Amino acid sequence: MIGKVVGALLGFVLYKSWLGALIGAVVGHFYDRAVSGLRRPAVGRDFIGPLFAFAGALSKSDGRVSESEIAATEALMARLRLDDDHRRAAIERFTAGKQPGFDAGGAIAELRAWCNGRRDLAFTVLDLLLDLVHAEGPLADAKLGLVRRLCEALGVSEHELAALSAMKGYAFGGAGPRGPGAGAGSRSAPRRPSEVDPYAVLGIARSANEREIKHAYRRLMSQHHPDKLGDVPDELKRRAEERAREINAAYESIKGERGIR
């Protein structure tokens, strides 16, 4: 912000016009972005505790923790390649999260603080949870409600959640221009890349024009760039790279279909 203000003032002084101020503001904007990138802090692994606390609450939300949900949680620990200390902490937080009366709001607040407004981290959190979310197939209302609370806290729309789900081979019922409807979600078997709807991956309607397609692609690539993750487990970086490839593949598919260059 400081760069834009200073740039605008210098531009106005140098060129003695509002056009000069505009040019200076643009230059200052790029300066701000460069400085922000240099100062970007490492994000660490503080998300593990609240992630598994929320996972416990999510699993218990429909009344019981099923074998499939336990298996999905174990698979998540394996994906993250947790060491003994982190694994112990994850189990403790998951156990706490599934206790009656547990307030999932605290875990959600911790995850929101960890993401710190960064949408790439928000998408990473949701990506990690999706296998657990869909472990039992159709979503119970209580489980869907928790997922929506988390998405709202992280600034992710239901339409964006539907697009992320499509990348992993899951489908939410009633997806439309404003995202999934109020109905329950449904699970499908993981699909091959050729079977994934490229428009769903980009989070756009099939009626989208060329400008909307390109805008969606650039926005998603910016949000899912692996280099932005900082100090997180290798599995998260690998998944971010996979998402970037999926987004690229979807875009190339649409370009070929539409004849876009």
Image (cartoon, helix red, strand yellow):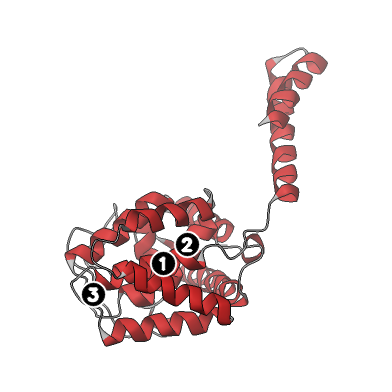
Out of 210 and 184, give the one closest to the viewer: 184
Q: Is residue 85 left or right of residue 97?
A: right
- Amino acid, disc 1: Leu
Marks 2 and 1, the one that precedes in the sequence? 2
* Residue on which disc 1 sits: 164
Q: Are marks 2 and 3 in contact (CB under 8 Å)?
A: no
The answer to whether residue 117 is above or below residue 162 is: above
Q: Is residue 225 left or right of residue 182?
A: right
Out of 182 and 211, give the one closest to the viewer: 182
How far apart are labels 2 and 3 at the CA level?
20 Å
How far apart are labels 1 and 3 at the CA level?
14 Å
Marks 1 and 3, the one that precedes in the sequence? 1
Would you say residue 208 is visible in this rendering?
no
Circle nearer the viewer, 2 or 1: 2
Marks 2 and 3, the one that precedes in the sequence? 2
- Residue 198 spot, x, y in % from top left: 42, 70
Would you say residue 41 is visible in this rendering?
yes
- Residue 28 spot, x, y in % from top left: 73, 32
Out of 2 and 244, give the one closest to the viewer: 2
How far apart are labels 2 and 1 at the CA level?
8 Å
Q: Are marks 2 and 1 in contact (CB under 8 Å)?
A: yes
- Amino acid, disc 3: Ser
- Residue 214 spot, x, y in % from top left: 52, 56
